[in-house]
């Protein structure tokens, strides 16, 4: 029988591994100290010898989509719909979304306990057995009996055994987003015209590649500026508002691997990733949006990720967004899911998750999958 325990004080966490140090910092200082729009409670779930972050959202405050199903499935979807149909009046989107939003709020859709939520768009796989998932779910529900239990970032291509284990334990899958995956058994993507052009651009560029953590630590304010301009100002305020303390923490504790591009004393772009088993996953990035597109900072950052994954023989999860760009470099689209356990909840709350599940199913029909 798996040994599962919820740890509620940062002093109880082991500091020998990265997860323990990361979660302990968020527990000690509070999540909003590092991620300003993630107003949730951070705890830790110890499963045998492993530590996983446990995020508790009582649904009391608006927050980022990484810890709010309402923000993810309604607010963010409405924003994307408005961008795709910019010719229609803004009031149209609010009118369409309002009734469903009232329903979701009314049934407390944000009242969720997230297992293994790192408050990033993509999380490392928890790699749990069916028995561990069963024990962990039971432990979380003992503490939070009126919460839905959710695993984010479930990828059926990269984690087929985890998907099977979750389904065996009664979790339902709600389509979350589309990500793009490179590599695997072939290396044909390295021969792609666009990939080769990106490599050539990187090689001939005057930019210097920086991996020294001490040097990067001196640029946390710049990284914060680049990240927020891209993710928040350009895309959506519902993205996690990572600040300088977040970047300093993840650098000092080696939570993420960082690579920067510097020229003339200015950091013009950076990308982060984590490695787990046979895969590498792009996490967060930023680049100077004021530079001409021909400079190609984004292309070079992607080339750095692809090159690193190739040299290490890893599959590469390029996360979501810019799908056409990534597919031109050989990436395959893969649907990603939230796994939801709601069997213990009242019928109205289960109905809300069923509605989101059906909406996700129709949204993905007719679209290519890996």
Image (cartoon, grey):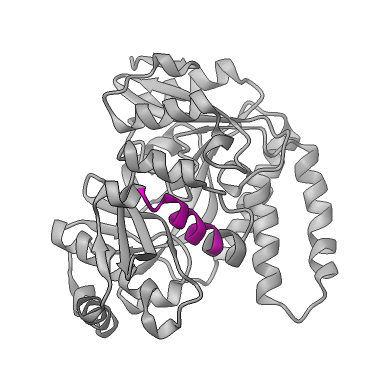
Question: Where is 178 relative to 70, above or below?
Answer: below
Q: Main secondary structure of the magenta part?
A: helix
Identified at 22% across, 44% down, the residue is 277
Mark count: 0
Asked whether residue 130 is in view, the answer is no
Q: Position of residue 43 (x, y in %)?
A: 50, 24
Query: Is residue 279 within the magenta segment?
Result: no
Magenta-highlighted residues = 218-229
Q: Of 43 and 163, which appears nearest the observer?
A: 43
Question: In the displayed image of the protein, which residue is found farthest to the front?
Answer: 265
Question: Where is 329 relative to 354, above or below?
Answer: below
The answer to which image quadrant residue 328 occupies is bottom left
Identified at 44% across, 28% down, the residue is 25
Q: Of 131 and 250, which appears nearest the observer?
A: 250
Q: Quadrant of the C terminus?
A: bottom left
Identified at 40% across, 42% down, the residue is 248
Q: On the rendered structure, is 102 left or right of 242?
A: right
Q: Position of residue 218 (x, y in %)?
A: 36, 50
Q: On the rendered structure, is 34 left or right of 90?
A: left
Question: Where is 203 relative to 151, above or below?
Answer: below
Q: Quadrant of the N terminus?
A: top left
Q: Position of residue 310 (x, y in %)?
A: 18, 63
The answer to which image quadrant residue 2 occupies is top left
Asked whether residue 124 is in view, the answer is yes
Q: Of 251 and 114, which appears nearest the observer?
A: 251
Q: Position of residue 125 (x, y in %)?
A: 35, 41
Q: On the rendered structure, is 134 left or right of 144?
A: left
Question: Where is 13 relative to 362, above or below?
Answer: above
């Amino acid at each position: 029988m798996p040994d599962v325990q919820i740890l509620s004080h940062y002093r109880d966490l082991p500091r020998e591994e990265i997860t323990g140090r990361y979660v302990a910092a968020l527990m000690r200082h509070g999540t909003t100290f590092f991620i300003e729009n993630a107003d949730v409670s951070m705890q830790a779930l110890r499963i045998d010898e492993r530590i996983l972050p446990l995020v508790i959202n009582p649904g009391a405050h608006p927050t980022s989509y990484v810890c709010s199903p309402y923000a993810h499935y309604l607010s963010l979807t409405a924003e994307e719909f408005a961008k795709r149909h910019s010719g229609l009046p803004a009031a149209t989107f609010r009118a369409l979304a309002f009734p469903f939003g009232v329903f979701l709020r009314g049934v407390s859709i944000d009242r969720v306990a997230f297992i293994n939520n790192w408050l990033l768009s993509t999380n490392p796989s928890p790699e749990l057995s069916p028995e561990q998932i069963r024990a962990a779910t039971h432990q979380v529900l003992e503490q939070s009996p009126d919460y839905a239990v959710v695993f984010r970032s479930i990828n059926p291509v990269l984690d087929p055994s985890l998907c099977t284990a979750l389904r065996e334990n009664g979790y339902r899958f709600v389509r979350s987003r589309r990500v793009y995956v490179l590599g695997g058994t072939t290396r044909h993507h390295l021969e792609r015209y666009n990939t080769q052009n990106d490599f050539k651009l990187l090689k001939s560029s005057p930019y210097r590649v920086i991996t020294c953590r001490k040097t990067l630590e001196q640029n946390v304010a710049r990284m914060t500026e680049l990240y927020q301009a891209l993710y928040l100002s350009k895309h959506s305020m519902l993205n996690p508002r990572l600040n300088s303390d977040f970047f300093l923490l993840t650098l000092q504790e080696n939570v993420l691997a960082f690579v920067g591009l510097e020229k003339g004393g200015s950091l013009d772009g950076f990308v982060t990733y984590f490695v787990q088993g046979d895969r590498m996953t792009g996490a967060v990035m930023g680049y100077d949006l004021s530079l001409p597109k021909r400079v190609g900072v984004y292309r070079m950052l992607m080339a750095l990720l692809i090159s690193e994954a190739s040299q290490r023989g890893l599959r590469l999860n390029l996360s979501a967004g810019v799908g056409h760009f990534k597919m031109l470099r050989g990436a395959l689209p893969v649907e990603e899911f939230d796994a939801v356990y709601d069997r213990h909840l009242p019928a109205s709350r289960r109905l809300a998750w069923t509605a989101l599940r059906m909406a996700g199913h129709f949204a993905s029909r007719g679209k290519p999958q890996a």
